[in-house]
Every structure is written in structure tokens, then in C-alpha cells.
Image: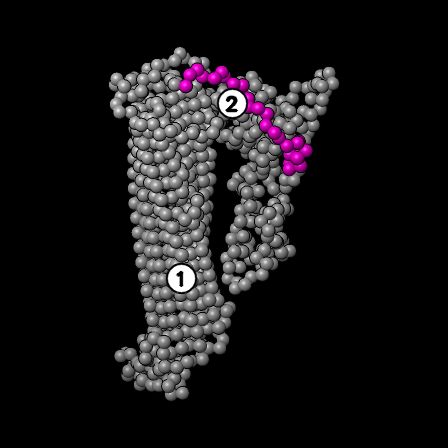
């Protein structure tokens, strides 16, 4: 086997000790070599595992691909010293071991090809470091490159061309630097970062053809990508969770069926001069309190599906600066209380539906933004939704601004031009403050306010609109210093209805009227508090309560209550109340005296114990018994009740109470209205207002206040008459491990998964070991655990070539969160 002989060339420092020589095996040559020597390997296949335990250099004599290391078992190449390996091919077949294992500092691999069926193509052990230059890794059986905790790796112009799992996995505080690398055709994430302290820096890299996320970062990992491309993946371009942070500079993310980036669990993402396009679901999906995205100088365009491009919910934050969004179904949706989005100097164009939609009590702040060619420019959909818009331009849209169902934005120095229908449309108890807003050249009304909404317009202008500048179908709006180029005669003042009419259908687009050639006789100044109408007298005030809706029988709602996991004492308390109410009504029908029961309740307990669900069912049951007219649930918190100046809190509280007429007003975290160091806090004003309303309208609304047990005791003594308004306190205990397991079982059944017997045992132990502190989520925790198991199951099963139906359903102990 002369062709497989290897030569040891001594370095200059050892020539005096011995001569260079040739050896039949690598093992013999390496045993003879001393630190600093070069082992030159002639072409051939070496069926031996190689151990480099000295700082030597091993290279192929005739260049890349001429020497193959292919032992029948074990780790083909183990490096335990600062050795250098050049131009070798490493092959392995043991799926439980890596093909290349580095356990030392300073190892170098140059021009090597790792073509293997192993647990990992290249693995760096705990604390090891290595540099890989111009190497390729193909490992269809496992990971491409794995960095164990504390390891450090530099990859330059390398390629992970196939991996059964993640292409590059950086774990437990390891760090990787990638320069002009390619990762493609992997069965898991292209780049996986997990664990506090784990990090990666990528420059000029490309990640594509991935069965999963392009980059997945979680558990506090961090990363920075510069001039990189992520495309053609089956999952999200970027997936961030549980405190992970990524910064992308000059990157491109495109051609993927899901989200360009999906963030949850207090993750953070910053985009600088990036482009996101051709995504199937959304560009940025941002979830959960503490989760944040910042984008500057970036472009988002060409959505492939019907989802909003930017989705901000559950208390998340999004900030855009100098960004361009175009050719999208919807551009920006902000949902849920405490969610907030801001945009400065941004452009929205060619948006098929809504450029900006705000709902669920969320907030959107826009400064110097431009919206053009959209269905709706801005839509504030419901109570608590609002924001501050300053210096924005809205042009060539169907409707400029819609404010509905109690939303209350502020617009200052904004313009709406060329709307197909109304420039500004307010309905269904929407409010809104408009200062120095100009609406012009629209085909419908300039400012169209219906339902007696108490909209405030100050120094607003309406010019050359097809129908009229200002249209107020009922009393309610207040104007000051507003001007219009149409001059209808002002009608007499009308009484304000006690409650606004329910929202009707959207406004019918106006027919195409020719624009006015010139103002009538110059702009007309509208005096303060003038109510304008061109539609004749307003209809008579309607009843404050909507008609009784069809509601399901009490037995069905009670059955749903009984089906809830746990909560035995809660169910008994609710049934006792319902029995008292039901029997009282029967006594009255029989001509007997019935006790005047107080139906208001206090719910105490930790989050996730089902307080809101029980409140909703309680309202339904009372409606089915005829005690309440509608039984609907109106959920509010401190932010919905407390204003910023004296007097505004009483107005907000009364408005919330009015919306709950005929149903249940549910005040979550009610103790926030009575902070310990409140002093002159306006929350006291909300409590005082609430006490009076509960007395004056005792038969119209059921009030339920909820929060932590100790804090609710403080709340109940904030007003001398408060505690007497509530009939009883219902305590919601934390879920036991058995009950959490039952919730997880229900989630499995609902989503067609199955728990192995050993999985149930492990899951029970997991729930039993959870810390039950103030942040414990109870039922929410059980659902989050299930979701995590589903994700881990998907990552595991994705590696199977042809999984069975059972494997697609069965959750095993390995799927539990770690």
C-alpha cells in the first residue's frame, strides 16, 4: 500500500533530533510526529480513526479530495490539540457520533469535505475553538455543525450543503462567526441559536432551501446578520422566542410561505436597511408583552397571501422609521390592549385593504407618514383603540380615516385628499379629536359623523368634496374654528341621545360627483359647538338598550361551566347564586316576597385561572334566565377608565358602564384603580363613579371586579360604599398538577395529538415542579407547555423520512420543554 504511505516532515526546530520518514499508516505517522511537524498524506482511503493530539499539520499531498478518512466505526477525526487539517475528505457512518470532533483550542480545518451519516458533521466540544475555511459539510442524518456550550467557531466561505437537522447549531453559550458561508437543504433551521450567551455573527451569508426556519433564536441567544439573504424556506425566515435578540443590517428575506419574522416571548429584533418581500403570511408577526421590533430604512412589499404584513398583538411593540411598505393586502394591524406601534417618516402605498388598523385597545402613533392608494387609510376599530397622528398625508384611498365603536385617536395637522368616500368617518360611539385636519377633493363627505358621536373638530378644513364638507346626522360632534367651502344653513340645536345608536353597515360609496369648480362665496366659518346636518331632522332618540338577543338556554351555559377543568368551589358559588336568583324570580311570580340580591361579584386569584371565562358564562346564564337583557361581556382595565385630567375619568367610566348595559362589566386588575401610594390618583374618581352607577342602575348591569387576592382587599376599602355593593367574593385557586395535565389532555384531543403513558407521567412531574409564584400562568401555562411540545415534536418528526400516522400524533417525553 505504498500509495497510502504518509510522510512526516520535521520543522526546523526538530531537524537535529531525527530525520523525516515515511509510514504505512496515519497512526504511525502521527505517533512519530512532534509538535509543529507536517504530515503529508498521499492519495488513498484510510480505514482508520484519526486522533490529532499534537499541534501538527495534516494535509493531502495532491490536493482536495485525494485523501479519504473512512473508518468502519467510531469518530473518523478527533482533534484534541491546536492542529491543522487541510484538503481531507472525512466520512463517517456511526449515527450516534460526530464525524469530526474538536475538543481543543486553536484547531483549523481548511478545504476539507465532511460527507457523513453522523449525529453531527462537525462538533466542537465544551469550550473548544476552531476555524473552518472553505469546508463543505453534508450530513443527511443529523446536524451540520454543532457548537457545544462555550465553544467558539469561525467559518469562512464554508458550505453546509445538506443536513438532516439544523445546518448550524450554536448551543448553551457558544459563539460562531460566519463569513460568506452558505447553508442550504437542511431538515431543520438553517441556523439555530439557543441558550443564554449563545451568539452568532454572519456576514455575506446565504440561507436557503430549509425545511423549517431560516434562523431560529431562542432562550436568550443573540445574533447579528450583515448583508445576508434568507429565502426559500418552508417556515419563517426568522423565528425568535424567549428573550432572543437579532440585529439585521442590509439583509434580504424573501420567498417563504410563512412569516419573514415571527417573534414571541420578549424577543427583540432590529432591522436596518433590510428588504422583506414575497412572504406567504406576514412580514413581521410580533406577539407578547416585552417583544419588540425596530425597523429603520427598510422595505416591505409584495405579500403572497391575504394576511396583514405587520401584526402586533398581546402587548408587543413595533417601531418603524423611514420605512416603505407597498403592494400588500393590509399593511399594519395593531391588536390588544398594551400593544403599540409607531411609525415616523414612513410610506404606505398600494394597500388593498387597510394601511393601518388598530383594535382591542391598542395604540398606533404615526408622525409624518404618507398613505396612498389604499382601501382604508386608518381604521380605529373599537374601544380603547387610538393613538396620535401628526403631520400625516392620506391620498387616493376609498376612506381616509374610520373611527368606530368607542375608539378615540388624535389627529393633528394631517391631510386627506382624493378619498372615494368620506375623508373622515366616525360612527358607533367612536370619538376622536381632529385638530388642523384638512380634507379635500373627495367624492363623498369631508367629515361624516353619525350616531351622535362626540367627536371634537378644531380648526379643520373641508374643501372641494363631492357631497359636503361636514355631515353630522345627529347631535354630538363639537366644532371650533372649522371652515368648509360648502355653506348649508345650520339647523337648530338637537338634544344629545342618551346612548349612541349601534353601529350600522359601512357607508355606501358616494356616486361620482363632479368636483366643485370654485368655492361658493369663500370659506364659511363654523361657530364653536355648531351641529351641522344636510340630511334633515335627526331621528328621535332610541332606547338605551338594544333588543334582547337570542341566547342559548341556561343549561347549555351551565354545562360549559361544568366542563371547565377544576374550579369546583367556583362552580358551586356560581350555581348557588343562580339558584338564589332563579328561586327569587319564582317567588315573585307566586306573589311572595323575594330577597333583593346583589349580583355583583369579586373574583380573586392568579392569572390564567378562568376568571374571564366564568364571567362570560355568568352573563350568558343571567340573560337566559331573563335577569339581564343581553348578557354580553365588556372587559376593561384601568387604562380604559382613568383619564389624564380631572373630570375625564368620570366620563370614561360612565361610558364603559353604558356599553355594559344589559350585560356584565368585567374590570380586570381592578386593584390598579386604588394604588397603595395613589394620593391624588384619578383611579379613586373611577371607583367613586362606579359606586354611584352600581347603585343607580343595579338591575341593568352586573359588575365583576377581578385581581390578586391581597390587592383586591385593598381595592374594596378604597371607597366606604364599595364592598357593600358586592354580594360575595369567589376565589379561583391555582390549578393543581392533575388539573394542568387534564388541560393538556384536552389540548391534545382538540388538536389531534396523543400523549404516551410515559409522557403523561413526565408531564405531571413537570407541572408539579413548576414554581407557583405571582407570574405563574395556570391554564395559560398548560397551553404554552402544549404548544412547546408541539413545536419540539415537529422538529423531531421533521427528521423522519416517512413518519407514520402514529408518529405524527404521538408526543413523547423528549418533547417536553427543557
Q: Is residue 217 above or below residue 48?
A: above
Residue 370 % position (x, y): 31, 37
Element under label 1?
Answer: strand
Q: Which residue is mark 1?
A: 184
Majority SS type along the magenta span: loop
Q: Nearer the viewer, residue 656 or 719?
A: 656
Tell whether 742 sits left or right of 298. Answer: right
Element under label 2?
Answer: helix
Q: Look at the image and say whether residue 611 sits in the magenta stretch.
A: no
Residue 722 % position (x, y): 56, 22
Q: Nearer the viewer, residue 710 or 277?
A: 277
Q: Which residues are magenta?
A: 535-561
Q: Which residue is painted at 31% across and 24% down in the image?
A: 462
Q: Quadrant of residue 348?
A: top left
Q: Which residue is mark 2?
A: 658
Q: Quadrant of residue 423?
A: top left
Q: Is residue 526 visible?
A: yes
Q: Is residue 798 above or below residue 619?
A: below
Tell me the quarter of the image containing the N terminus. Answer: bottom left
Amino acid at each position: 500500500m505504498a500509495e497510502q504511505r504518509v510522510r512526516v516532515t520535521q520543522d526546523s526546530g526538530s531537524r537535529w533530533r531525527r530525520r523525516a520518514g515515511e509510514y504505512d499508516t496515519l497512526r504511525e505517522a502521527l505517533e512519530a510526529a512532534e509538535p509543529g511537524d507536517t504530515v503529508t498524506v498521499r492519495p488513498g482511503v484510510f480505514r482508520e480513526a484519526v486522533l490529532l493530539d499534537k499541534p501538527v499539520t495534516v494535509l493531502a499531498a495532491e490536493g482536495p479530495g485525494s485523501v479519504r478518512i473512512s473508518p468502519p466505526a467510531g469518530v473518523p477525526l478527533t482533534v484534541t490539540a491546536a492542529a491543522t487539517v487541510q484538503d481531507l475528505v472525512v466520512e463517517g457512518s456511526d449515527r450516534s457520533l460526530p464525524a469530526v470532533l474538536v475538543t481543543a483550542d486553536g484547531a483549523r480545518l481548511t478545504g476539507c469535505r465532511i460527507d457523513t451519516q453522523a449525529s453531527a458533521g462537525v462538533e466542537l466540544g465544551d469550550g473548544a475553538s476552531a476555524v473552518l475555511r472553505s469546508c463543505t459539510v453534508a450530513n443527511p442524518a443529523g446536524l451540520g455543525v454543532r457548537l457545544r456550550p462555550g465553544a467558539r467557531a469561525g467559518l469562512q466561505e464554508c458550505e453546509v450543503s445538506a443536513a438532516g437537522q439544523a445546518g448550524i447549531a450554536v448551543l448553551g453559550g457558544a459563539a460562531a462567526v460566519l463569513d460568506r458561508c452558505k447553508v442550504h437543504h437542511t431538515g431543520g433551521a438553517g441556523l439555530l441559536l439557543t441558550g443564554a450567551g449563545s451568539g452568532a455573527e454572519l456576514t455575506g451569508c446565504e440561507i436557503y432551501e430549509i425545511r423549517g426556519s431560516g434562523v431560529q433564536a431562542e432562550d436568550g441567544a443573540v445574533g447579528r446578520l450583515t448583508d445576508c439573504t434568507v429565502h426559500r424556506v418552508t417556515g419563517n425566515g426568522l423565528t425568535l422566542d424567549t428573550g432572543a435578540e437579532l440585529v439585521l443590517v442590509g439583509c434580504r428575506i424573501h420567498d417563504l410561505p410563512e412569516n419573514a419574522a415571527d417573534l414571541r416571548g420578549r424577543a427583540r429584533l432590529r432591522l436596518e436597511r433590510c428588504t422583506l418581500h414575497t412572504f406567504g403570511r406576514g412580514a413581521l408577526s410580533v406577539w407578547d408583552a416585552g417583544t419588540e421590533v425596530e425597523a429603520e430604512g427598510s422595505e416591505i412589499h409584495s405579500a403572497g397571501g391575504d394576511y396583514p404584513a405587520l401584526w402586533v398583538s398581546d402587548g408587543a411593540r413595533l417601531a418603524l422609521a423611514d420605512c416603505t411598505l407597498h403592494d400588500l393586502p393590509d399593511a399594519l394591524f395593531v391588536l390588544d390592549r398594551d400593544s403599540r406601534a409607531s411609525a415616523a417618516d414612513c410610506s404606505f402605498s398600494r394597500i388593498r385593504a387597510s394601511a393601518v388598523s388598530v383594535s382591542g385597545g391598542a395604540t398606533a402613533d404615526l408622525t409624518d407618514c404618507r398613505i396612498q392608494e389604499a382601501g382604508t387609510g386608518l381604521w380605529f376599530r373599537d374601544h380603547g383603540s387610538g393613538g396620535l397622528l401628526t403631520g400625516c398625508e392620506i391620498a387616493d384611498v376609498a376612506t381616509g380615516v374610520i373611527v368606530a365603536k368607542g375608539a378615540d385617536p388624535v389627529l393633528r395637522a394631517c391631510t386627506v385628499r382624493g378619498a372615494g368616500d368620506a375623508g373622515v368617518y366616525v360612527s358607533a360611539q367612536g370619538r376622536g379629536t381632529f385638530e388642523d385636519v384638512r380634507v379635500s377633493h373627495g367624492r363623498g363627505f369631508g367629515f361624516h359623523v353619525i350616531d351622535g358621536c362626540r367627536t371634537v373638530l378644531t380648526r379643520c378644513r373641508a374643501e372641494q368634496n363631492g357631497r359636503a364638507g361636514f355631515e353630522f346626522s345627529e347631535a354630538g360632534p363639537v366644532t371650533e374654528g372649522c371652515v368648509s367651502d360648502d355653506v348649508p344653513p345650520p339647523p337648530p340645536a338637537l338634544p344629545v341621545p342618551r346612548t349612541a345608536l349601534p353601529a350600522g353597515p359601512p357607508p355606501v360609496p358616494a356616486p361620482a360627483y363632479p368636483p366643485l369648480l370654485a368655492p361658493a362665496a369663500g370659506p364659511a366659518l363654523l361657530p364653536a359647538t355648531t351641529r351641522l346636518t344636510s340630511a334633515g331632522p335627526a331621528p328621535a332618540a332610541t332606547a338605551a338598550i338594544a333588543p334582547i338577543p337570542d341566547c342559548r338556554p341556561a343549561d347549555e351555559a351551565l354545562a360549559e361551566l361544568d366542563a371547565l377543568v377544576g374550579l369546583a368551589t367556583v362552580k358551586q358559588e356560581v350555581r348557588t347564586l343562580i339558584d338564589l336568583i332563579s328561586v327569587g324570580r319564582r317567588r315573585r311570580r307566586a306573589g311572595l316576597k323575594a330577597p333583593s340580591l346583589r349580583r355583583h361579584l369579586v373574583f380573586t386569584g392568579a392569572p390564567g385561572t378562568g376568571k374571564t371565562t366564568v364571567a362570560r358564562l355568568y352573563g350568558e346564564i343571567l340573560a337566559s334566565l331573563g335577569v339581564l337583557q343581553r348578557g354580553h361581556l365588556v372587559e376593561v382595565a384601568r387604562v380604559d377608565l382613568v383619564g389624564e385630567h380631572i373630570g375625564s375619568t368620570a366620563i370614561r367610566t360612565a361610558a364603559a358602564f353604558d356599553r355594559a348595559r344589559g350585560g356584565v362589566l368585567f374590570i380586570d386588575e381592578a386593584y390598579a384603580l386604588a394604588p397603595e401610594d395613589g394620593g391624588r390618583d384619578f383611579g379613586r374618581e373611577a371607583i367613586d363613579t362606579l359606586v354611584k352607577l352600581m347603585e343607580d342602575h343595579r338591575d341593568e348591569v352586573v359588575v365583576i371586579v377581578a385581581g390578586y387576592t391581597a390587592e383586591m382587599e385593598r381595592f374594596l376599602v378604597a371607597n366606604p360604599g364599595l364592598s357593600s355593593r358586592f354580594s360575595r367574593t369567589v376565589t379561583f385557586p391555582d390549578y393543581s398538577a392533575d388539573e394542568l395535565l387534564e388541560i393538556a389532555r384536552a389540548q391534545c384531543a382538540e388538536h389531534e395529538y396523543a400523549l404516551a403513558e410515559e409522557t403523561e407521567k413526565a408531564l405531571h412531574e413537570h407541572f408539579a415542579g413548576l414554581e407557583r409564584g405571582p407570574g405563574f400562568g395556570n391554564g395559560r401555562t398548560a397551553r404554552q407547555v402544549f404548544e412547546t411540545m408541539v413545536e419540539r415534536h415537529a422538529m423531531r418528526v421533521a427528521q423522519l423520512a416517512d413518519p407514520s400516522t402514529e408518529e405524527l400524533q404521538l408526543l413523547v417525553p423528549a418533547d417536553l420543554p427543557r
